[in-house]
Amino acid sequence: MFSSFMINAWLSGTIIALLVGAVGFFVVLRGSAFAAHAIPNGAFAGAAGANLIGVNPLLGLVSFALVAAFGIGASSKWAKSDVAAALALVTMLALGAAFLASSTNYEPAINALLFGEILGVSSSEILPVILLAVLCGLGLTFLFRPLLYSSVSDELSRASGLNTTVIEVLFLIIMALSSALAVPVVGALLTFSLMIGPPAAARLLSSRPSRALWYSMMFSLLTLWVSIASSYVFNLPIGFFVGTLSAVTYLAVRTWVVVSARRVAVTIA
Amino acid sequence: MTSEMSSTVGSSLLDVRGVDVSISGRVILHDVNFSIDAGEFTGLIGSNGAGKTTLLRVILGLQATSGGTITLHGHELTRANRSVGYVPQKVLFDPDMPVRVRDFVAMGVDGHRYGLARRSKSIYDTVEEMLDAVEADAFANRRVGALSGGEQQRVLMAHALVSRPDLLLLDEPLANLDPRSAFDIVRLLHTIATRQHVAILMSAHDMNPLLPVMDRVIYVANAKVASGTTEEVVRPEVLSALYGHHVDVVHVHGRVLVVGGDDDEVDERYVPDHPALVVE
Amino acid sequence: MHWLIEPGLFANGSVRTALELGAMVSLVSAIVGVFTVLRSQSFAGHALTDVAMAGGAGASLASVAPLAGFLGGGIIGAGAMDAIGVQRVKDRDIATGVVLGAATGLSALFLYLVASSSATSGSTQLVLFGSVFTVDTSTLPYVAILSALVLLSLYLIRRPLLYSSLSAELAGARGVRLRLVGSTFMVMLAIAVGLSSIVIGSILSTALLIGPAASSLKVSRSIVQASWLAVVFGVAATWLGIVFAYDSFYWVPSRRGLPVSFFVVMVVVVEFVVVNLVRTLFSKRVTLSNVSTLPSCSAGGA
């Protein structure tokens, strides 16, 4: 499984897992589970659209993911976010489905975009993917303290002078970019699992922010590595492994934590 | 119009002049005047909805005014002045959040800074010092979302004090406490205020726990404010003028009770010429 | 009108079946949806569709009728969510999302196995986006019976359901069996999701569940009014969706046509946007949608 054509899978998988693990740490902290559902669907619609008009899929992925992200940011003031958001999520799926239905390679494309494809990132795309991922990584590094502060207490962070709107916008952009990068490999419907599961498990294991972040990234990386390997070995879709592994990891950690409840009162890390 | 007594403008830390605040067309505060000197312990007293929180938010720069000026150290107040610390009434923390008490307190120093500077040892020392000052050492490594109400309050105080402000604002810190705990918190605040030379401005709807330590009281009612020492402000004539109807001040065993009267009209005895107030 | 009613629309047997099926399914979804939105359980409704999808995919694999799969999956999902139980909202959402992410993973597995084992293609399309034109007419009686069952059950528990939806605390104090009512509703929700998955596919069935309901609640002042209006919105969206999908074969020269579910979702969204615009422009009266901002129900499931 380490032959030359799989190099791209491992490379892109590693980068994506690390990024999604880091972003996911903040997503769980901020409680943006909903956005993590909706933005990848936007990316899906974008990829389908790009496929239809024959444009570079990365372009479609990124642009629609950004639109979805800003839409969510804006609509949170708006209507009952619950409903408007769920509708937006579903609309993007429907759009993507329509785009794909109008194109020729419907079935394989649908499966790949929704459920993932280990060879989802081709050699020509690997460089832009790495660059974007590094960009997001730098952004997160730069934003780490203010992002953490505003996620912990919006009120206090504003009192200290932070413009939380700016931080929210920057974070949505990073979420959009990382979703766009993850969708071709992990699949639109499973990006949520990777973005939420490992970080939710990780934060139960440490009460120190930087350590919990590190664990998030490691759990995510491990999940994706095992998924890629299993997908290759058993010749089954990667989405299956990502979904089940994320759930299993989370449940296992959660159970372990509950069982050894007394030790959790004091930090383990 | 309200006036305030006993202040020497030159030395004041915080100076509030003629401030008006309206929210959605409703006048919350009108022509507020008072000043606070360095190291003073001031109680902001008023019933719920009187405008205490609004006033605090104005000083923090989180609420816009529609008139008047506020100066801190003689300079115009900007948003997020580092010499003003803030302790909100309650913060909702997610119990699973991977942030320890000491991490949260440290955010009071550099949580708002961009970039990846490493935390210097002096920051950790300051955090340790503040945790000690508020008697929170015992749970310093616990998740900040796993604290009781009283513990959380002390952590919030440490978080506000760690940037060494000159003025500490507290929003109803005694609201849900039993009298014993309220006494403890007031004692703690007074100790900190004296040791670190921090001016304290805390809001409360009952001034009694503060009577032993208050240097100054700012009484809010009816969108107006009266400020001065307790003796000067907490009198029937001053408070009646403030409320716009008759009010009695009752002293029982060293405690003060402000009691509303039967008639809605201003008692003629207490009208206009009292030097404390000029009533419109 | 010729462009709307393309040649042979009503003569076509599968279209008539589709219209009948669509009407029944959207009616049930609309009414169940009104309560779902009222109880702020849109997320739960959405989560159930993931499990329904796995069920549908599994059914395809086992060569069993898709309806059985959707229903089975939905009910298992309802049970799982009941088991995960009532915790802090954020916690529960994370737990639900992650666990049901596994269901999505299972769907991926099943669909792949189906595609590689059988000669018939298009099961992905069927499970994900519905098969209203190709559904077997023998399914109709089952759909009819289940729809009637759901409506009857809802009617029977309508008072305690409404009461507990508005305030679980008050209702509990008055003796409403919160757990029973809550669990019953979850099962109804699962069945509604299962039914609508045939018409519109599982991942889009959320639209038919909460779209018409949300639109109607914005402009209604009673549950009855909201239910009627939601039904109108829902059936209209489904029928228009079917008609447009049929017509779309003629619009594009390549004769490929767009899926029904796409058009249904579009109509639902247009309805929602228009209703919101109309309301913003016209009145500020309190309607039932304001009520939905009360704390979400706590008993018997997410």
Image: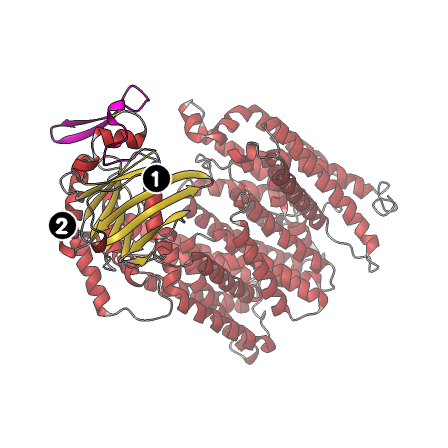
Closest to the camera, between mark 1 and mark 2, is 1
CB under 8 Å between callouts 1 and 2? no
Query: Callout 2: helix, strand or loop?
Result: helix
Residue A198 is at least partly visible in this image: no
Q: Where's residue A94, x and y in %?
A: 66, 53
Q: Tell me which segment is drawn in magenta.
A: B248-277
Q: Chain of mark 2?
A: B
Q: Which mark is residue C169?
A: none
Query: Callout 1: helix, strand or loop?
Result: loop
Q: Earlier in the sequence, mark 1 or mark 2?
A: 1
Q: Where's residue C197, x and y in %?
A: 64, 44
The residue sitting at the bottom extreme is A4
Residue in view at x 63 percent, y 65 percent? A60
Closer-to-camera residue (C232/A257): C232
Residue B270 is at least partly visible in this image: yes
* Amino acid residing under circle 2: Thr
Q: Where's residue B80, x and y in %?
A: 34, 57
The residue sitting at the top extreme is B262
Q: Say left or right for A108 vs B229.
A: right
Residue underneath mark 1: B51
Closer-to-camera residue (A257/B172): B172
Say above or below: A82 vs B109.
above
Q: Chain of mark 1?
A: B
Residue underneath mark 2: B191
* Amino acid residing under circle 1: Gly
Q: Residue C105 appears in which quarter of the rendering? A: bottom right
Image quarter of the N terminus of chain C: top right
Q: Where's residue B59, x and y in %?
A: 32, 50
Say above or below: C157 vs B153.
above
Q: Is circle 1 on the same chain as circle 2?
A: yes
Closer-to-camera residue (B127/B189): B189
Whether residue C172 is in magenta: the answer is no
